[in-house]
Image (cartoon, rainbow, N blue to C red):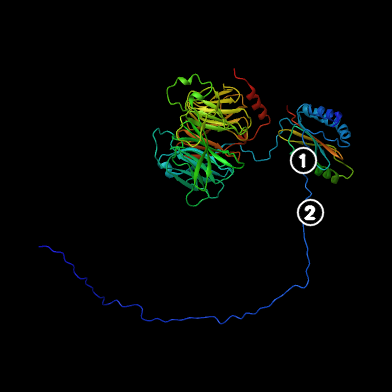
């Protein structure tokens, strides 16, 4: 009944469409032939001449080679003979003199007040309710980068977040619009600018990845990342830092996370990868002097919540843990970690050498003093700031910072006795150890309605700026008064005195 | 270095508050140095020459006998001479 049939195609010609090409003309042109002529020359006389600069008359001020007996310069003895009496007389009268007591010179304008000069916000991050988890100043002191993420979320977070940078020295700075926004697929927990290249930023993510961004690029800003391999952290990375690498001039990224791993990564920018070069694992059983905590049945990893590098000794670093431990560790430790190998490409070592007296809760922040090689300060959820010496387990001094948690602490880069702490009540307390009272020298209210302050950083170049990151997603830049930034006459001596006190 | 030179320097060094002494020769090279930074030698040599020429420009019959620089942290004293300079750094408030 039904059969297949193919029909011929039917064509309908257009009535109105015509070929557009009805007139065509060709034209050509050509230049006239170019005139050429050839000629030759040759010099008749030759002469040679040369120049050279004279070696410069440098005044190189040299040290005499150590340990060798210098042939005594003529007249030295007589010279010293002549001047000795005069010099000794001056030294003696100087030591007794009160002529300059209380004499101060004002080289710069004195600033009496502390004021908040900028309140930087990124509205779209604030709408999502993201908090500022970490801030970092660039090495030039003009750019501040803020990492957005969450600190209060206990779950595995897949929320998108971002890293924003503002250049404070730029004219037309808009506090509501960052100069650059880097979108990141996971919350960023920690951030660190490269100490000498102002365009590189290292960041640690909630997923355990570590990423290095290059803000000079226009397209893909990621210079290198760890990706999710067997080498990476499995837990959030709470601290990243740049440390000098094995080769001179090279910096490697250090990352520490709550999985108890401290890893060192070299940047391979050609491949866009961070390659694991060394690793440390903190295992509870390998922590020295740890009789009290080994009764705990939980995981044997010591989760790292804070890390501090010592500016005096490149081999030492301090680690603060989730359980309140504060450990002194060494980069050159050779003991192998007692962790079961998990497919990492590098053997993990146990770095802990010394354990300080444990705190009552997670240690959120540690910082080594830039003015004394043995001092550091630590803060945690017990609301106290402990001033420790590297030489003994008990703290030298305990200051009550606030009634709630304390999330960040930093020593002032200009005043040896000053440090600032960020509290969970939305205040930054600045303590001056030179004062007799233990109450703060200044309190900066972040005006966030009592919401916690998570991080704070002093500007490395401009000594009067302090940046504070709040949990409502804003970053306040404070301009500190001269009293808080100018070093007093005897501060280093007082700090030395504090450090030498032995705790009872 | 003869014992006498050493003794003299030791007497100066052990004085109250002294944190370093340097002896610089006329070209600005350090002859002797004790426990402090080298930068002082070159910079102070230049400054002393400048101070001396200032004094002599103000009054050609006059000459520089002693130079003292007081800073927030310490005091630098320079005793000049034809061939040498003796620089002593003292922390007076100790």
Residue at 40% across, 32% down: A154
Whether residue A334 can be seen here: yes
The mark nearer the N terminus, 2 or 1, is 2
Q: Closest to the observer: A339 or A297? A: A339
Q: Closest to the observer: A133 or A268? A: A268
Query: Of helix, strand and loop, which one carries label 2?
Result: loop
Residue at 83% across, 45% down: B53
Residue at 65% across, 80% down: A37
Residue assigned mark 2: A54
State the image coordinates of residue A17 (x, y, percent, origin top left): 29, 76
Q: Closest to the observer: B82 or A425? A: B82
Residue assigned mark 1: A62
Task: Tell me which chain the residue with mark 1 is part of.
Answer: A
State the image coordinates of residue A35 (x, y, percent, origin top left): 61, 81
Disc 2 versus disc 1: distance between alpha carbons? 22 Å
Q: Quadrant of the C terminus of chain A?
A: top right
Q: Quadrant of the N terminus of chain A?
A: bottom left
Count the marks: how many? 2
Q: Closest to the observer: B56 or A315? A: A315
* Left or right side of A480 for A122: left
Vertical relation: A105 (above or below) A96 = below
Report which quarter residue A47 is drawn in.
Answer: bottom right
State the image coordinates of residue A496 (x, y, percent, origin top left): 65, 26
**Residue positioned most to the top:** A504
* Left or right side of A24 for A412: right
State the image coordinates of residue A203 (x, y, percent, origin top left): 49, 40
Is disc 2 surrounded by few (<14), some (14 to 19) or many (20+) residues within 10 Å? few
């Amino acid at each position: 009944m039904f059969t297949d049939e193919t029909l011929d195609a039917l064509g309908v010609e257009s009535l109105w469409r015509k070929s557009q090409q009805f007139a065509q003309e060709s034209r050509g042109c050509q230049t006239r032939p170019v005139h050429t002529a050839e000629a030759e020359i040759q010099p008749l006389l030759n002469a040679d001449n040369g120049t050279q600069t004279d070696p410069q008359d440098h005044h190189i001020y040299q040290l005499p080679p150590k340990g060798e007996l210098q042939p005594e310069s003529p007249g030295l003895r007589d010279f010293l003979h002549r001047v000795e009496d005069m010099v000794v007389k001056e030294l003696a009268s100087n030591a007794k003199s009160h002529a300059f007591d209380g004499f101060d010179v004002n080289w710069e304008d004195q600033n009496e007040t502390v004021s908040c000069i900028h309140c930087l916000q990124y509205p779209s991050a604030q709408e999502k309710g993201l908090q500022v988890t970490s801030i970092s100043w660039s090495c030039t002191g003009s750019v501040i980068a803020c990492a957005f993420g969450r600190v209060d979320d206990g779950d595995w977070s897949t929320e998108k977040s971002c890293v924003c940078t503002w250049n404070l020295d730029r004219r037309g700075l808009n506090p509501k619009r960052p100069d650059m926004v880097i979108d990141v697929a996971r919350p960023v927990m920690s951030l660190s600018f490269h100490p000498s290249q102002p365009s590189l930023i290292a960041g640690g993510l909630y997923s355990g990845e570590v990423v290095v961004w290059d803000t000079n690029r226009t397209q893909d800003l990621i210079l290198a990342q760890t990706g999710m391999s067997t080498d990476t952290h499995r837990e959030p990375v709470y601290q990243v830092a740049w440390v000098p690498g094995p080769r001179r001039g090279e910096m490697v990224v250090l990352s520490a996370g709550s999985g108890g791993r401290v890893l060192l990564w070299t940047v391979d920018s050609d491949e866009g990868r961070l390659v694991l070069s060394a690793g440390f694992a903190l295992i509870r059983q390998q922590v020295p002097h740890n009789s009290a905590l080994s009764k705990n049945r939980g995981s044997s990893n010591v989760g790292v919540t804070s890390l501090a590098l010592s500016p005096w000794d490149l081999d030492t670093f301090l680690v603060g843990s989730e359980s309140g431990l504060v450990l002194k560790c060494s980069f050159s430790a050779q003991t192998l970690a007692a962790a079961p190998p998990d497919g990492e490409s590098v053997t993990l070592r146990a770095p802990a050498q010394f354990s300080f007296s444990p705190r009552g809760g997670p240690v959120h922040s540690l910082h080594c003093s830039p003015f004394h090689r043995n001092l550091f300060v630590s803060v945690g959820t017990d609301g106290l700031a402990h001033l420790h010496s590297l030489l003994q387990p008990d703290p030298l001094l305990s200051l009550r910072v606030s009634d709630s948690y304390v999330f960040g602490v930093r020593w002032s880069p200009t005043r040896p006795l000053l440090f600032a702490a960020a509290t969970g009540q939305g205040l930054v307390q600045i303590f001056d150890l030179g004062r007799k009272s233990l109450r703060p020298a200044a309190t900066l209210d972040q005006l966030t309605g009592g919401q916690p302050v998570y991080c704070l950083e002093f500007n490395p170049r401009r000594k009067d700026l302090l940046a504070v990151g709040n949990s409502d997603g804003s970053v306040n830049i404070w301009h500190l008064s001269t009293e808080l930034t100018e070093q007093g006459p005897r501060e280093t001596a007082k700090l030395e005195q504090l450090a030498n006190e032995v705790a009872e | 270095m003869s014992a006498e030179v050493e003794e003299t320097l030791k007497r100066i060094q052990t004085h109250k508050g002294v944190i370093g002494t340097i002896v610089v020769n006329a070209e600005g090279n350090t002859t002797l140095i004790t426990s402090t930074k080298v930068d002082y030698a070159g910079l102070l040599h230049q400054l002393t020459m400048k101070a001396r020429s200032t004094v002599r420009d103000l009054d050609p019959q006059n000459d520089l006998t002693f130079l003292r620089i007081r800073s927030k942290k310490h005091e630098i004293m320079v005793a000049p001479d034809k061939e040498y300079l003796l620089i002593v750094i003292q922390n007076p408030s100790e």
